[in-house]
Image (spheres, rainbow, N blue to C red):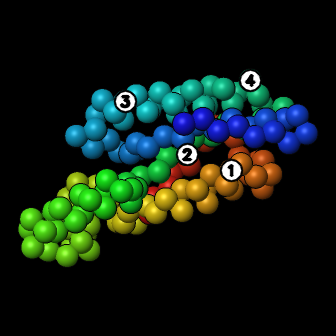
Amino acid sequence: MFFRRCYGGIGDVYYLSQANVTVPEDLIAYSTTKAALFSLSRGISQPTSGSGVTVNTIVPESTLTKGAKEFLATVALKENKTKAAVSKAFFNDARKSSLLKQFTEIEEITDTITYFLSPLSSATNGVVIKVDG
């Protein structure tokens, strides 16, 4: 996904990617393609240095999407567990790299994007911003 904003003719470019910094075994190919976005945003940020244009990568971790909610409900029903217990097991077993051990809410991602699309983030350029629950 591609975001752009303009203030007084100066634009900021952002790439939004979902991939783990620590690559899960089941997402190697997916995570490899997303790693290219990290390099791309850093590479694009270098020639824009000093121009007022910032380029950053937003990396949401496991997000509580409709599909994730369905996954939790299906496993909970199948294993006769609560969704909370399934979520805890998911982060303990499959997503050990998560620092907060919870799904990221969509609102947390949009809040982060809103901040980086605002003038408040003007001193941040060429970095990867991890949104981890």
- Mark 4 vs mark 1: in front: 1
Q: Quadrant of residue 4?
A: top right
Does residue 85 sit above or below 11 in this rendering?
below
Q: Height in image: 88 above or below 56?
A: below
Residue named by callout 1: 116
- In terms of sequence position, does the residue under pointer 2 or pointer 1 come before the other? 2
Q: Residue 27 at what x, y percent from top left?
A: 28, 38
- Precedes in sequence: disc 3 or disc 1: 3
What kind of residue is marked 2?
Ile
Most foreground residue, 29 or 126: 29
Foreground disc of the pair 4, 2: 2
Residue 25 location, quadrant? top left
Q: Which residue is mark 3?
A: 32
Indicate whether 127 appears above or below 96. above
Looking at the rendered structure, the kind of residue marked 4 is: Pro
N-term mark: 4 or 3: 3
As measured in the structure, the alpha-carbon distance from the residue carrying label 4 to the one carrying label 2 is 20 Å
Percent of width and height locating residue 97: 33, 54
Identify the image quadrant of residue 68: bottom left
Residue found at x 51% / y 30%: 37
Quote the CA–CA distance across marks 4 and 1: 19 Å
In the displayed structure, does residue 32 sit left or right of residue 113? left
Q: Secondary structure at mark 2?
A: strand
Of labels 4 and 1, earlier in sequence is 4
Q: Which residue is mark 2?
A: 58
User: Mark 4–mark 1 contact, CB under 8 Å?
Assistant: no
Examine the rendering and report whether any part of residue 89 can be seen: no
How many C-alpha atoms fall within 10 Å of the one at disc 2: few (<14), some, or many (≥20)? many
State if disc 1 and disc 2 touch (CB < 8 Å). Answer: yes
Q: Which residue is mark 4?
A: 47
